[in-house]
Image: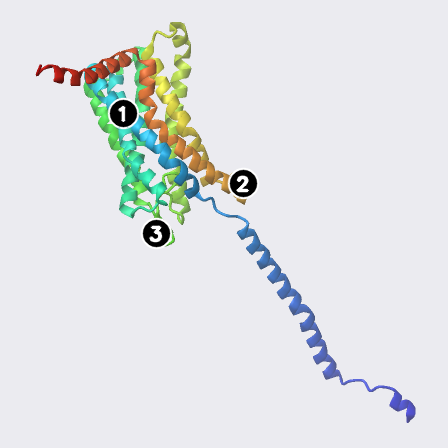
Amino acid sequence: MVGQEAVPSSPPPELCQVRGLKMTNYTSAPEEDYDVLIEGDLNGDDMETCPPYDAKLLSSRVVPLLFSSVILAGLLGNTLAVPILAKHKGLRHTEKVYFLNVAFSNLCFLLSLPFWAYAASHGGVLGNPMCRILIAFSSTGLYSEAFFNVLLIVQRYLVFFNMRTFLPARMVRWDIVSSVLVWVLATLAVLPELAFYEPQMESQKYECFLSRPHFLPADEVKWKHFLSLKMTILGFLIPLCVLTFCYARLRKPLRCRGREDHPHNLVFAVVVVFLLMWGPYNIALCLSTFKEHFSLHDCNSSYRLDGSVQITRIVAATHCCVSPLLHVVLDTTFRRHLCHLCCLWRDRPLRATEDPV
C-alpha cells in the first residue's frame, strides 16, 4: 500500500492530448505573430527614412529673384529684336523670318515667367485654370522654338548645298506657310498636357510649380511615360539629331571658308545654346520618370533626381534671354541696327525740346 501511494497516478490520455494542444498553440502562435509584427515595423521604418524632395525651399528663394532678371533682360532683348528683324533687316531672307518667330516664341515663354515667380514666392498656390494657361504658354513657346531651330538648320543646309530648287519659287510664301504650320504643330503638341493635367493637392490647396513636372498625372504611369517622352523627343532629340547630321555634312566646307559665313555661325550658335540649356533637364526628367528601369528607385537616387529636375528646369527657363545676346555678339548687321535704333531713341527728347525754341 505504501509503494502504491508513492507512485503518482498518470493522467488520463484525453487530458494529455488537451494539454499537448494547448502547449502547441501556446508556443507556435506567438512566434508567428511576433514575426509579422517585426516585418511591419521594419517596413514602416523604411518608408519613414525616404523623405520626399521639397521643391518649395529652392523655388521660394531663387526663382523670384532669378526670373525677375530674366524677364527684364528677355523682354528688352526680344522686343528690340522684333523691329530690327522686321523693319531694318527685312524679311526677304528665310532665316530672318525664322529668327523673328524665335523671338515671338521667347516672348510667349516669357509671358508665363512672372506668374511662375509669383507662384514660387507664395508657395505655388494658383488656381487650376490659371495653371493650365501657364502650361499652355510655356510649352507652346518651348515647342515652337525647338521646331524653328530645326527649320533654321535645314534652311542653312539647303542654302549651303544649293538645294533651294526643292522648295517653292517664292520663298517668302514658303516661309510664311512653314511658320504657320510650326505654330499649329506646337499648339497640337501642348494639347495632351492640357487634357491630362492634374493639379497636385497639398494642404487642401492646388500646387502649381514651374520646376516640378506638373503636367504628369501621378496616378497614370503610362501617360506619365508618354508625356515625358513627348517632351524629350520633340524638344530635344529631334533638334539634336538634325543638328548632328547637318553639322557632320557642313563641318569640312565651313572650316575651309573660315569665319566669313556669319549666318551659319549664328544659326548653329542659337541651336547649340538651346540644346545645352534644355538637354540636362530632359535627361533628368527621363531618368526621374523611368527610374525603375535604371535601378534608381531607392531613396537617395529619387531625392537627387527630384532635385536635379528642379534645378535644371530653372536653368533652362533662362534660355529666352540668350538668343538676342547671340545676335548682338555674332551678327554685325544686327549690332549696327541696334546702335542706330538706340541713338534714335536717345535723340528724340532732345529734338522735342529744340523745336519750340
**The residue under label 3 is which amino acid type?**
Lys
Looking at the image, residue 40 lies above or below residue 156 = below
**The residue under label 2 is which amino acid type?**
Ser
Q: Horizontal placement of 223 versus 181: left or right?
A: right
Are discs 1 and 2 less than 8 Å apart at CB? Answer: no
In percent of width and height, residue 297 lies at 52, 43
- Secondary element type, mark 1: helix
**The residue under label 1 is which amino acid type?**
Leu
Residue occupying the point 58% across, 58% down: 41
- In this view, the residue in front, 313 or 192, is 313
Are discs 3 and 2 less than 8 Å apart at CB? Answer: no
Residue 36 sits in quarter: bottom right
Q: CA distance from mark 3 to mark 2?
A: 33 Å
Label drawn at residue 295:
2
Residue occupying the point 36% across, 36% down: 64
Residue 40 sits in quarter: bottom right
Mark 3, residue position: 205
Mark 3 or mark 2, earlier in chain: 3
